[in-house]
Image: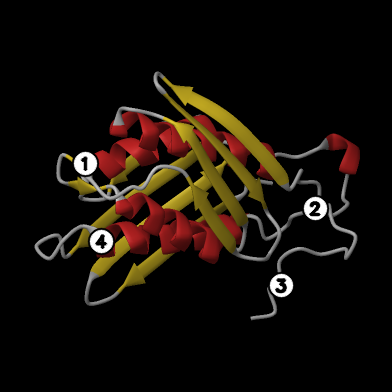
Amino acid sequence: MERKSEIKRKTFETDILLKLILESNEKSKIDSGVKFFDHMLNSMSRHGFFYLDLNCKGDLGVDDHHSVEDIGICLGRAVKDALRDVRGIRRFGESTIPMDDALSLVVVDISGRPYFRYNGPELTGKIGNYSEELTIEFMRSFATNAEINLHINVFYGDNRHHIHESIFKALGVSLYRAYSINPMLKNEVMSTKGSLYDYSD
């Protein structure tokens, strides 16, 4: 069964349409309105083996914050929705990815419990027009709305572009390892409780 989701979200600040298909090698179509962020999401989807069709119209005249944060909300919700049937998933995923001078470790637990933690160099500068702190905002929004544990450790890096790209690539790989099916589990849920997400709402 194809694991996919479609999320529409419209506020006074952003208008987003997002389609997600897990376990896909199709090339994503991403237009967030923020070029550097497009590059990061493309890297994440490519290495995470998921197809992302994203269009966001945001209040970029204010700044990029609302667009990046709201895309994190939508992508998180899409991942949770696509994983409505969590039977057989590995649940945990981790990846340590180098990008030239930068090295990042990302660990994911598809737990139904949102938690985000970042440890590494302070991300307060700019890459072109992109504010580095937006990567943290995206990750927090994504983890909260996907209801996953997300831990990011950046060990080192000199080039700011490389730091961010190693984070997004590592997240993609970790997600793929977490959401992929373990044939040994058959129809079992990888939890002693017997459940992960609560879809009662």
Q: Relative to residue 160, is residue 123 depicted above or below?
A: below
Q: Position of residue 152 (x, y in %)?
A: 53, 45
Question: Who comes first in sequence, dot 2 or dot 1?
Answer: 1
Classed neighbour count for the residue bearing mark 3: other residues with Cα under 10 Å, few (<14), some (14–19), many (≥20): few
Query: What residue sits 30% from the left and 32% below the top?
Result: 161
Question: Who comes first in sequence, dot 2 or dot 3?
Answer: 2
Query: What residue sits 44% from the left and 52% below the top?
Result: 19
Instruction: Name the secondary structure under disc 1.
Output: helix
CA gap, disc 3 and disc 4: 30 Å
Instruction: Name the secondary structure under disc 4.
Output: helix
Q: Nearer the viewer, mark 2 or mark 1?
A: 1
Classed neighbour count for the residue bearing mark 4: other residues with Cα under 10 Å, few (<14), some (14–19), many (≥20): many
Residue, disc 3: 198
Q: Nearer the viewer, mark 3 or mark 4?
A: 4
Q: Nearer the viewer, mark 2 or mark 3?
A: 3
Q: Position of residue 117 (x, y in %)?
A: 54, 55
Which of the two residues, 111 or 122, is positioned nearer the viewer here? 122
Residue, disc 1: 35
Q: Relative to residue 106, is residue 79 depicted above or below?
A: below
Residue, disc 4: 65
CA gap, disc 2 and disc 3: 14 Å
Question: Who comes first in sequence, dot 1 or dot 3?
Answer: 1
Q: Is residue 195 visible?
A: yes
Question: Who comes first in sequence, dot 3 or dot 4?
Answer: 4
Inspect the image, locate mark 1, and give the three-letter code of the amino acid beneath it.
Lys
Residue, disc 2: 87
Q: Is residue 26 visible?
A: no
Q: Is residue 17 left or right of residue 195?
A: left
CA gap, disc 4 and disc 1: 13 Å
Inspect the image, locate mark 3, and give the three-letter code of the amino acid beneath it.
Asp
Inspect the image, locate mark 2, and give the three-letter code of the amino acid beneath it.
Arg
Question: Who comes first in sequence, dot 4 or dot 2?
Answer: 4
